[in-house]
Amino acid sequence: MKTGNLYANTAPPLDGERFETLLAHKGLVIERIVSSSKIASQEYVQEQDEWVVLLRGDATLDVEGDAIALQAGDHVFLPSRTRHTVLSVSEGALWLAIHLHSQAS
């Protein structure tokens, strides 16, 4: 059994984002992400589906050319191969990301 607290040790990094895998099981990966307001704009195109919820703070994402403003509690589903970029994020924003990887047969 593995236990933890989503809100423990959430001081933001000096810049960028800190990713921590909370659970990896079969095709499921759950990550906690803590963001600094100083982020480099990086486009992501992932092979897996992703559902992400912003637990604390606010952020703006570019998803396939559409700006999406998020506040604490907002969530978004990003199907595999969806282009997305974090355009801006508040200092210490806290995310929970759930990645759904297809499993080899």
Image (tube, rainbow, N blue to C red):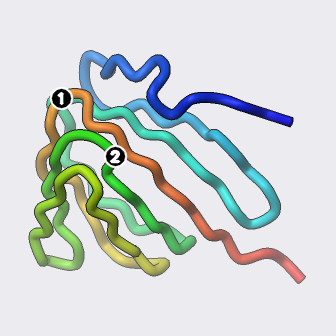
**Residue at the location (17% across, 59% down)?**
70
Amino acid on which disc 2 is placed: Leu
Left or right: where 64 falls relative to 21:
left
Q: Nearer the viewer, mark 2 or mark 1?
A: 2
- Give SS at disc 1: loop
Counting from the top left corner in percent of width and height, residue 37 is at 16, 31
Residue named by callout 1: 91
Residue named by callout 2: 55
How busy is the neighbourhood of tag 2: few (under 14 within 10 Å), some, or many (20 plus)? some
Q: Earlier in the sequence, mark 2 or mark 1?
A: 2
Counting from the top left corner in percent of width and height, residue 76 is at 33, 70
Along the line of sight, the residue nearer the viewer: 22 or 15? 22
For the residues marked 2 and 1, what is the alpha-carbon distance in whole angstroms? Answer: 13 Å
Left or right: where 31 falls relative to 82:
right
**Residue at the location (37% across, 33% down)?**
34
Counting from the top left corner in percent of width and height, residue 29 is at 65, 55
Residue 36 sits in quarter: top left
**Residue at the location (57% across, 29% down)?**
5
Quadrant of the snapshot with the N terminus: top right
Amino acid on which disc 1 is placed: Glu
Residue 61 sits in quarter: bottom left
Counting from the top left corner in percent of width and height, residue 92 is at 25, 28
- Give SS at disc 2: strand
Residue 89 sits in quarter: top left
Along the line of sight, the residue nearer the viewer: 4 or 91? 4
